[in-house]
Every structure is written in C-alpha cells, then in structure tokens.
Amino acid sequence: MQEPQGSSTSDGHGGDVVAERYLVESQQSASHIQLACRPPLCAFPLDGTALCVWSSEDPPHQLLILRGHHQPITAVAFGNTGSPLLVCSASQDYVITWELQECRERARRGAVPRGLVLGTLLGTVVCVRYSPDDRVAAVCAGNKVLVLDVKSRCTRVELEGHQGPVTTAEFCAWRTHVISASEDRSFKVWDYCQGSLVHSSSVLTASPLLSLFVDGGSRQLVVGCAQGQLWVFSLVESHHYRPVTRVDLRKETDSFSTRRVGSRLGSQPGEREPPPAHKLDRGDEADTALPVLGLSGCDLSLILNPGHGGLAPETAGGLWVGSTVGSLVLNLASFELEAVLYYKDFRNLSIQVAGSCALMSRNDKLLCLSALSSVLRTR
C-alpha cells in the first residue's frame, strides 16, 4: 500500500482537477469485479477474499478489513439509507451484509468484525444492489436475479428469463421494480414483490449490456454497453418504456473536442486543431470503444459552475460515465458531453486503462475507484 499521491496535472488542466489519493496493491486482480463508492468511502476486494473499506477522510493506512469469505469476492455494494450504513460482499460461497459502524467498533476493541450471511452457494455473483430502503438486495448470478430479504435472510424470489448471464441490476425508487441487463443484450423490468416480468426490451446492440442508471428526476433509464453506446428510455408509466435517444460516446467525444477547440480558437488565432478524441493514441481499438463500466448521477450546476450553482434545476441533471480510459460527463437534457477526463492526460496518475470502476459524486467532487490488474487506485 502507498501513501496518497500528489495532484496530477497535464497541459490545459489545473493541478486540482484530478488527484490520485490512494493506491492499494492486491495479490489478486480486481479487474472485471463490481467495486463500490459512497463518498467518502470506497469498498473493494483485497487479496481476493478480504473486503477492504477505505475512507478519504481517514488518516493514511486506516483501512477496515472484513474477512468472512473463503472464495474470491466478485461483487461489492453499499447500502442507501445510511442508518445503519451497510456494505454487501458476494462470492461463490456467501453473500454477506456488514454494518460498518458496528464493524469499526469491534475492530477498535480488537474483536473480529462479523457480518450476516444473506445467501450461500448462489453461484458466481457479478452484481449486487440494495433496494432504496435497504430491505432487500438484488443478486445477479448466472441468468437469474435473486431478491434476498436483508432482515429475514431468505430468498424472496428468483427472477428468471434472460437468455444470457445477467451483468447488472438497479432498483426503481418509486416502484417495487428492479431492472436487470444481460449479455443477451436486452434489459428486463421486474416487479420483485409479485415476482412478475413487467417489461422485456428488444435486443439493443451486438455487444453485452454492462451498466444501468435510473434517474428519478427525469424518470429515465440509461443503459450502457461494451461498445460505448448509451440508450435512454422513459420510465413514465404512460410511456411504456419508450426509447428517448441513443448516444454514441465516440461521436460525442469528437463533438466535444470540436467544440472545445472552437472555443480555444476564438481566443487563440492560429491554434492547430487536434485530432478527434477517438483517434488519439490510447493503445488498441478495444480502448477506443469506450465501454461503459459504470454510471452515476451528478448535478451539472455544481460541476460546471462550482461554488455558484448557476444552472436552472431543469438543466442541472448530469451523468458521470466511467470507461476504461477515463470518465465523461453527459448532460441529460441535451445528451451532449460537458467534460472528458482521460487517465492518460494526467501525468502523475499510475493508471492508464481500467478493468473496472465505481464512481459517485458528492457536491462538485467525483470519487472514482478504478482497478487494473493487481493494483487498485482511488481518485
């Protein structure tokens, strides 16, 4: 493990734009594993079977290590209510929920922190999510979504219908619905109280769906895939999951680059235009596809006008998009990019390409946890 790193800088970026705060080396890769952020906390597997919780507000090296798994952890998620604050870890042997405050108190007393087992031998779990009230957890294993009751620690319902492995799931805050996406390239909406299928989409693309985001403000669903495409659907009941738009992130990065250069040229005549964003040297074609590894909502008024809150409420909705090569900010009103942060543009970052990431914003700051090979970095 290493001390927090200094701020990273690059041409055209201030030193406080991106800072690498902590680096953790693990004996087993955390790439392609669901990681978790809840500012100021990050949670991730350490050396395969241990769950590590790190806080950006704690002194260096003050890590909470939770042990209970015998098989490598494959998915991690924080609860939503914070009373108490829960974190869930899942592997082939157990799905465990931990009360963080209780675990911290036990660790301070020198006792072994303990969690509660929600399920055993459920298969390879690739995603776990708590419901908005933390009463149930959705566990994605194989082609199924299992809904587990957190209090009684029993399986409420098994939701089956996908033709390929389920990759992710999200709850709808205003209904008893959970939405799942799959390698079969479709998403499904379920009523987990009734155990029934509410809606099944058509096949959206040629590549697996990897991420979901439910925007409660606009009542929209955003679906991301491995080839850098976003689909937006309306969740308004009378709209019947009507498609709103599709966003090609490579095209949007080109458009963003052009707009940024145009703005610069207005103040610096004669400046040469750089190549489109997707033609910049980032390694191989897989990186340029901008696979959507994670999605998180944000307030554009705080990001674009920090300290001012200058945008009207109806235009303040934004979306952080985490990809292998960096993070992007999408305006959910215009569906245009407002910011692009590539790892390679910041010289002091030790990461260049991420295998998995979790991200969540608080005020005008983004907490991003990225994993590559055997090293984890927080930003």
Image (cartoon, grey):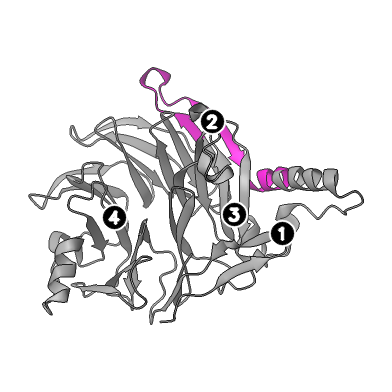
Question: What's the CA distance linking mark 2 and mark 1?
Answer: 27 Å
Residue tagged 2: 315
Secondary structure of the residue carrying tag 3 is loop
In the rendered structure, does residue 150 fall within the stretch colored magenta? no
Q: Work out whether 260 lies above or below 127.
A: above
Instruction: Name which quarter of the figure residue 236 lies in.
Output: top left
Q: Are marks 4 and 2 in contact (CB under 8 Å)?
A: no
The reply to whether callout 4 and callout 1 are in contact (CB within 8 Å) is no
Q: CA distance from mark 3 to mark 4?
A: 26 Å
Which of label 4 and label 1 is nearer to you? 1
Q: Which residue is mark 3?
A: 290
Q: Earlier in the sequence, mark 2 or mark 1?
A: 1
Q: Which residue is mark 1?
A: 12
Q: Identify which amino acid the numbered label 2 is placed on.
A: Thr
According to the image, label 4 marks what residue?
78
The image quarter in which residue 72 lies? bottom left
Please, what is the three-letter code of the amino acid marked with disc 3?
Answer: Leu
